[in-house]
């Protein structure tokens, strides 16, 4: 079966750095997405990786290793507004989008 | 800034009643998705349209759910009859990409359904 694993919950301190991991087992690969979702709101797009390596976008970076079926989202200089769930999603060889359950990130002052 | 419009934002209904949700995607977006999301879980695809055609409705409970996008623009998702287990957030999303699931999805604010 197809599976995406993410930690259920993480806690970090304001101003610090946190890394949210995502591992996937899917039938083929056509890209990996990260979305941010605040409580009670819709997901918003953060990043898209299709090639190996690191993509940096301001305080957020996303890394992909296709050979390891692994990605991480790195958040720097954490702010209270970064408290949210972070969803990892993978497009498989049939172009179906498989979603993880999300990682709830709690930021403490 | 263009947005995906959804209504209603909140809906409370009794079981066995009919419910309908409406979505208007960003203009020019060919692909439209309806997702269901239960608290603490990732979105679950119900149906995916490319223009007016259904691309994937394999996870849609067709005995009670129906969806249409008649003119390839706005879309309606209907549940009849509603069951207690249907309580969830119903998310509509659209994408500019014609090659599905290779581009950013733009989500509406969602419709929160509570079935009593």
Image: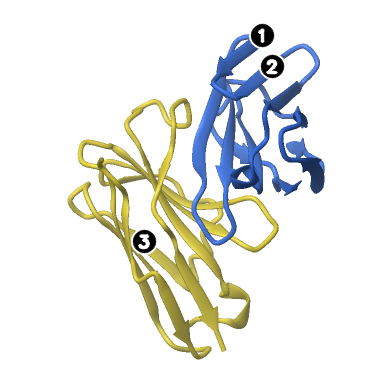
Chain colours: A blue, B yellow
Q: Is residue A92 left or right of residue B7?
A: right
Q: Is residue B22 left or right of residue A85?
A: left
Name the one closer to the observer, B96 or B62.
B96
Q: In this view, does A9 lie above or below A78?
A: below
Mark 3 — residue? Answer: B67
Q: Where is residue A58 shown, x and y percent of the image?
A: 54, 21
Q: How far apart are marks 2 and 1 (CA)?
A: 5 Å
Mark 2 — residue? Answer: A64
Q: Do we see residue B79 in this rendering?
A: no
Q: Distance between the residues labelled 1 and 3?
A: 39 Å
Q: How crowded is mark 2: few (under 14 residues within 10 Å), some or many (20 or more)?
A: many
Labels 1 and 3 within one chain: no
**Res. B87 image quadrant:** bottom right
Observer-side mark, 2 or 3, equals 2
Mark 1 — residue? Answer: A53
Indicate the secondary structure of the residue bearing disc 1: strand
Name the one closer to the observer, A105 or A92.
A105
Does the CB distance between marks 2 and 1 fall below 8 Å? yes
For mark 1, name the chain.
A
For mark 2, name the chain.
A
Q: Residues within 10 Å of mark 1 (few under 14, many from 20)?
A: few
Q: In this view, does A22 lie to the left or right of A81?
A: right
Q: In which quarter of the image is the C terminus of chain B?
A: bottom right
Q: Is residue A46 above or below residue B9?
A: above
- Which residue is at 36% across, 61% downward? B67
Name the one closer to the observer, B67 or A103.
A103
Q: How many labels does the image show?
A: 3
């Amino acid at each position: 079966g197809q599976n995406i694993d993410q930690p259920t919950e993480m806690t970090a301190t304001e101003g610090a750095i946190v890394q949210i991991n995502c591992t996937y087992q899917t039938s083929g690969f056509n890209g990996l997405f990260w979305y941010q979702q605040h409580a009670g709101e819709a997901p918003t797009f953060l990043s898209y990786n299709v090639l190996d390596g690191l993509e940096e976008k301001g305080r957020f970076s996303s890394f992909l290793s296709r050979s390891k079926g692994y990605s991480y989202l790195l958040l720097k200089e954490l702010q209270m507004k970064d408290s949210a769930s972070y969803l990892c999603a993978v497009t498989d060889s049939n172009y179906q989008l498989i979603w993880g359950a999300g990682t709830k990130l709690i930021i403490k002052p | 800034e263009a947005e995906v419009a959804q209504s209603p934002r909140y809906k409370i209904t009794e079981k066995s009643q009919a419910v309908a949700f409406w979505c208007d995607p960003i203009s020019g977006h060919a692909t439209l998705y309806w997702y269901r999301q239960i608290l603490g879980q990732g979105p679950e695809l119900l149906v995916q349209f490319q223009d007016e055609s259904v691309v994937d409705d394999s996870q849609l409970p067709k005995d009670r759910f129906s969806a249409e996008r008649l003119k390839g623009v706005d879309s309606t998702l209907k549940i009849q009859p509603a069951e207690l287990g249907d309580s969830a957030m119903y998310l509509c999303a659209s994408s500019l990409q014609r090659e599905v699931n290779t581009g950013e999805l733009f989500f509406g604010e969602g419709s929160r359904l509570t079935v009593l």
